[in-house]
Image: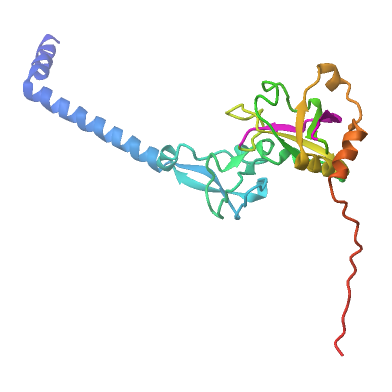
């Protein structure tokens, strides 16, 4: 037994033996490492792709999606590649973007429909029109007007004698949304700076508000929490101001348009 241990020690302590063992271990490590990298690169991963061309604003449904196997090294390089269909279904193709047929999906290609600029317009009822009022941080009283608040709209102008008219024109009007200068709802805006108040108003009131802006200014005036919690009817607050605005506007009569058929003789 002692003789065997002595021979083993001599074998291990031999410089040539140590060199050979190190070389073998080094080759083995290189082989295993290379093999691992090759297998990792070639290991296919199943990712979604667009079966048809998807235009901007299209809401993605399961039938829009197919699957293809892609090498793992492609996925590791494309860090923004979407690999899970759950991150796509129900999402909307971003505005100004098109996903070509057979194209892969990348972050930035799709968004939550709730972040779409016209998302809040989808539910405007018939007979109503969206009205936009330009604002800034100062005119919103330090950004104190928020989505779903009920506020008043005041009119400022001059009468025929150059006297200032300043009075409440519309009371209890609901703010449909507050947006920044990119049309993004302030709830999701990175800037947090208001640029536009959006309302949904009856068509006749829309006409009055547009005329009011043409001859004067409209100012958003916030009210208290109770005003929003117990909203009244959205209506014209001053018949005097309404009539003044209408007196400065031309009335266009309704026209009956008929299709006239002419016969060549």
Please say whether residue 227 is visible from this viewpoint.
yes
Residue drawn at point x = 63 percent, y = 30 percent: 188
Give how far across and how far down residue 196 sits, in percent. 69, 34
Give how far across and how far down residue 120 sits, in percent. 74, 37
Residue drawn at point x = 88 percent, y = 78 percent: 261
Considering the image in quadrants, where does the C terminus appear? Answer: bottom right
> Which region shows up in magenta?
162-181
**Residue 177, quarter of picture:** top right
Question: Is residue 134 located in the magenta-colored stretch of the structure?
Answer: no
Q: As displayed, is residue 30 above or below residue 227?
A: below
Residue drawn at point x = 88 percent, y = 44 percent: 247
Q: Is residue 6 left or right of residue 77?
A: left
Q: Residue furthest front?
A: 161
Q: How many marks?
A: 0
**Residue 178, quarter of picture:** top right
Residue drawn at point x = 77 percent, y = 41 percent: 215
Which of the colour schemes (rainbow, by chain, secondary structure, one colour) is used? rainbow
Q: As displayed, is residue 33 above or below residue 228?
A: below
Please say whether residue 125 is visible from this viewpoint.
no
* Type of secondary structure dominating the magenta stretch: strand
Q: As displayed, is residue 72 above or below residue 229?
A: below
Q: Is residue 148 left or right of residue 236?
A: left
6, 142: nearer the viewer: 142
**Residue 90, quarter of picture:** top right
172, 44: nearer the viewer: 172
Q: Residue furthest bottom?
A: 265
203, 86: nearer the viewer: 203
Considering the image in quadrants, where does the N terminus appear? Answer: top left
Q: Is residue 209 left or right of residue 235?
A: left
Question: Is residue 174 located in the magenta-colored stretch of the structure?
Answer: yes
């Amino acid at each position: 037994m002692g003789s065997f241990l002595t021979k083993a020690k001599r074998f291990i302590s031999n410089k040539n033996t140590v060199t050979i063992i190190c070389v073998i271990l080094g080759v083995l490590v290189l082989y295993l490492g290379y093999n691992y990298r090759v297998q990792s690169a070639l290991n296919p991963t199943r990712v979604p792709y667009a079966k048809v061309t998807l235009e901007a604003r299209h809401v993605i449904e399961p039938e829009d999606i197919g699957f293809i196997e892609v090498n793992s090294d492609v996925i590791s390089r494309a860090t923004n590649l979407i690999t899970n269909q759950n991150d796509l279904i129900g999402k909307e193709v971003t505005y100004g973007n098109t996903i070509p047929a057979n194209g892969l999906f990348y972050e930035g290609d799709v968004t939550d429909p709730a972040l779409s600029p016209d998302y809040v317009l989808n539910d405007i009822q018939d007979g109503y029109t969206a009205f936009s009022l330009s604002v800034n941080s100062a005119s919103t009283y330090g950004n104190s007007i928020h989505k779903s608040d009920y506020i008043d709209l005041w009119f400022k102008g001059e009468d025929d004698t150059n006297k200032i008219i300043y009075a409440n024109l519309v009371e209890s009007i609901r703010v449909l949304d507050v947006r920044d200068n990119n049309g993004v709802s302030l709830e999701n805006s990175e800037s947090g700076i208001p640029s536009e108040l959006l309302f949904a108003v009856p068509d006749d009131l829309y006409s009055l508000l547009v005329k009011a802006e043409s001859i004067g200014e409209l100012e958003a005036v916030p009210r208290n929490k109770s005003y929003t919690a117990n909203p009244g009817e959205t209506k014209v607050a001053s018949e005097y101001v309404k009539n003044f605005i209408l007196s400065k506007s031309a009335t266009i009569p309704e026209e009956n348009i008929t299709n006239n058929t002419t016969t060549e003789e």
